[in-house]
């Protein structure tokens, strides 16, 4: 199987040795017949574009590097999600021109192990009803329900099938009791939307249904996952847990914790 890898980056020079090392391990896997990497980078003030270009010199791949003079957006600003959608779609374009079986979308700043990538490949084959499988990145922020030092990272992209957002700062980010049980049992959970720092889907699904990211209605992954659901279910996979390490972790308040505990209990 040939994999197209898509990553959007900015000022990631400190993380690139680890990230590119992961890609080199992926290149060596016999299960893959090829790896084509498509990177989009803009406005980096460090060596990110130079390092990516050097790494791609003798490899099949694409690098779009631009200096747009854009400020760095933070949080859930519409301008940020729209810009991320545009960047991801730009990085997708070279992949659509290739003969590829799978699309792997990945965030370069995560701490991802090779086995976690291979686990997504195995899950997509194990669940034929799945159109897309998503990792569940964990961050070094304590669980708001007191269940450990790590919590689910990508709660904004996560939407359950009832349309409810993920529980922010929770190790188990789901509301529905059955879905919470599946999560705790380590079973993939069908959702309306997810990303979790890494996602895998057949390229045929992308092409057949014209999947693109859109950032004008909230998180850019919502529209992409809505398109994927036309081909099957989107699965959030609680056993595939890359890590996000915050140098200065966000903190939740006691009032927020009390509210979440009350809502989960109800």
Image: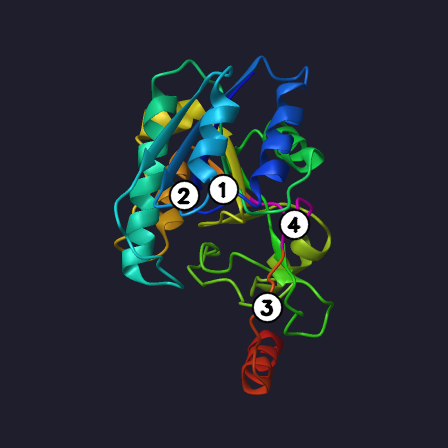
For marks 2 and 4, the one nearer the N-term is 2
Asked whether residue 91 appears in the rendered view, the answer is: yes
Q: Label 2, secondary structure: give it.
A: helix
Q: Which residue is mark 4?
A: 238
Q: Label 4, secondary structure: give it.
A: loop
* Colour pattern: rainbow
Using the image, tell me which numbered label, if any, was put on residue 249.
Answer: 3
Q: CA–CA distance between discs 2 and 4?
A: 18 Å
Does 65 appear above or below 134? above
Q: Which residue is mark 1?
A: 234
Q: Are marks 1 and 2 in contact (CB under 8 Å)?
A: yes
The location of residue 196, given as percent across then percent down, is 54, 49
Asked whether residue 4 appears in the rendered view, the answer is: no
Q: Using the image as rendered, state which of residue 56 and residue 61 is in the foreground.
A: 56
Q: Which residue is mark 2?
A: 225
Does the magenta portion include 12? no
Q: CA–CA distance between discs 3 and 1?
A: 29 Å
For marks 3 and 2, the one nearer the N-term is 2
Q: Are marks 3 and 4 in contact (CB under 8 Å)?
A: no
Does 53 appear above or below 241? above
């Amino acid at each position: 199987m040939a994999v197209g890898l898509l990553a959007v980056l900015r000022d990631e020079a400190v993380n690139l040795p680890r990230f590119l090392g992961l890609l080199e391990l992926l290149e060596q896997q016999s299960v893959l017949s090829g790896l084509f990497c498509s990177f989009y980078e803009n406005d980096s003030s460090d060596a990110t574009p130079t390092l990516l270009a050097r790494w791609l010199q003798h490899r099949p791949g694409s690098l779009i590097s631009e200096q747009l003079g854009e400020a760095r957006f933070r949080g859930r600003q519409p301008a940020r999600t729209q810009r991320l959608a545009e960047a991801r779609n730009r990085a997708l374009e070279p992949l659509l021109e290739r003969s590829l079986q799978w699309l792997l979308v990945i965030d370069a700043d995560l701490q991802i192990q090779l086995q976690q990538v291979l686990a997504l490949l195995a899950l997509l084959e194990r669940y034929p009803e799945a159109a897309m499988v998503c990792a569940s990145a964990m961050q070094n922020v304590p669980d708001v329900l007191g269940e450990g030092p790590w919590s689910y990272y990508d709660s904004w992209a996560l939407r359950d099938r009832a349309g409810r957002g993920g529980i922010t700062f929770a190790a188990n980010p789901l509301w529905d009791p059955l879905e919470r049980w599946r999560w705790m049992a380590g079973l993939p959970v069908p959702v309306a939307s997810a990303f979790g720092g890494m996602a895998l889907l057949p390229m045929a699904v992308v092409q057949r249904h014209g999947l693109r990211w859109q950032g004008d209605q909230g998180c850019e992954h919502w529209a992409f996952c809505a398109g994927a659901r036309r081909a099957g279910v989107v699965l959030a996979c609680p056993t595939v847990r890359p890590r996000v390490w915050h140098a200065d972790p966000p903190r939740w308040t006691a009032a927020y914790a009390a509210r979440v505990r009350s809502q989960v209990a109800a």
